[in-house]
Image (cartoon, rainbow, N blue to C red):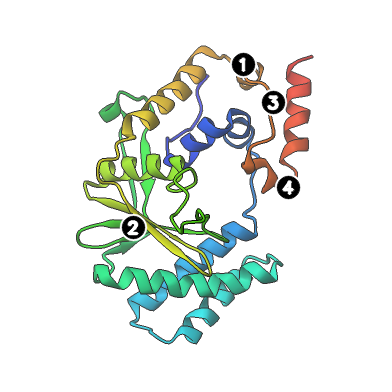
Amino acid sequence: MKIDYRHSASKTNTFIDSPAFWIINELFDFESEPNARMVMGLAAEDAAHHALSNQINDKDTIIDYSKKKYLEHNVDEASECEWSGIIANKFVENLREFGDVVSFQNEMQIPGKKYGLKYDVIGKTDFEFENVIVDTKATAYIKRLKAGHVDPNWYPKAADVRQQCLYRDLFGKETMLLYCSPKDQYCVDMTERDELQVIINAMKHIEYVLDICKTKEDVVRIFPLVCDNFRWKGSPGSVDFAKDIWTKALK
């Protein structure tokens, strides 16, 4: 089976977390609309980039810009709209120390043969500075233990580490993760973290599945439909869409 496909950290992490969700998105063209939390992150990042690029320091101005960006997505969640502006300011406060922004949402695509792959690999960064790439993650809260330490079972998230290890190799620059909630922040570097081969191997699994299957329905028949991953909860209509596909394929 041949499809127009390019590997990315996002797609591969989806495959690792939920093959069925990857199937409906990549093979059956289900479009997952961004939910309120996703829009919150997008708006906060846009506002932070706008502020850093234009040397805007006024918190209210940054908040207003973030809310405006949030509302452009027509998502009606008041709490996330408010949080987006607060998180945007936290992004700005933490990112200023890295200097001028070299690029924002810079995309790179390279031939997959570098990693022994058939399909190309793409990466899209958040904030690139002279010495580091920082990927910003907006969240409702950061879970900490009673002693005040960030819960190591929650942060950094394994999918985020895999993504940044790939980006470090793609862009040839050190990477970091910056988690921000309305009340907290947590920064993680990739020093001594190496999950590159994990994500590359998952890409190879994807290619193997696509190689041995003659049709999209054959791929469906390989994987059971399990909808308990967080991705399904934030994607209205995805469960019913998938049930219809699996029902027809397994007749």
Residue in front for this viewpoint, 203 or 86: 86
Q: Is residue 249 visible?
A: yes
Q: In the rendered structure, which disc, 4 or 3, sits on the residue that comes first in sequence? A: 3
Answer with the quarter of the image where residue 221 lies.
top right
Q: Is the Cβ of the residue at disc 1 closer than 8 Å to that at disc 4? A: no
Identify the amino acid type marked 1. Answer: Ile
**Residue 75 image offset from top left, x and y in percent:** 68, 65
| 239 on left or right of 24 | right
| Residue contact between numbered discs 4 and 3, judged by CB atoms under 8 Å | no
Q: Is residue 91 above or below residue 126?
A: below
The residue under the point 25% across, 57% down is: 132
Compare marks 4 and 2 and give the one earlier in the sequence. Answer: 2
Question: For the residues marked 3 and 1, what is the alpha-carbon distance in whole angstroms?
Answer: 10 Å
**Marks 3,2: beta carbons within 8 A:** no
Q: Is residue 47 visible?
A: no
Mark 1 to mark 4: distance in Å?
24 Å
Read off the residue under disc 4. 236
Residue under label 2:
134
Q: Earlier in the sequence, mark 1 or mark 4?
A: 1
Residue at the spot x=61%, y=74% of the render?
82
Q: Name the kind of residue labelled 4 in the image.
A: Pro
Q: Which secondary structure, mark 4?
A: loop
Marks 2, 1: nearer the viewer: 2
Instruction: State the mark number for residue 222.
Output: 1
Disc on the earlier residue, 2 or 1:
2
Counting other residues with Cα less than 10 Å from the Cα at mark 1, is it few (<14), some (14-19), or many (20 or more)? Answer: few
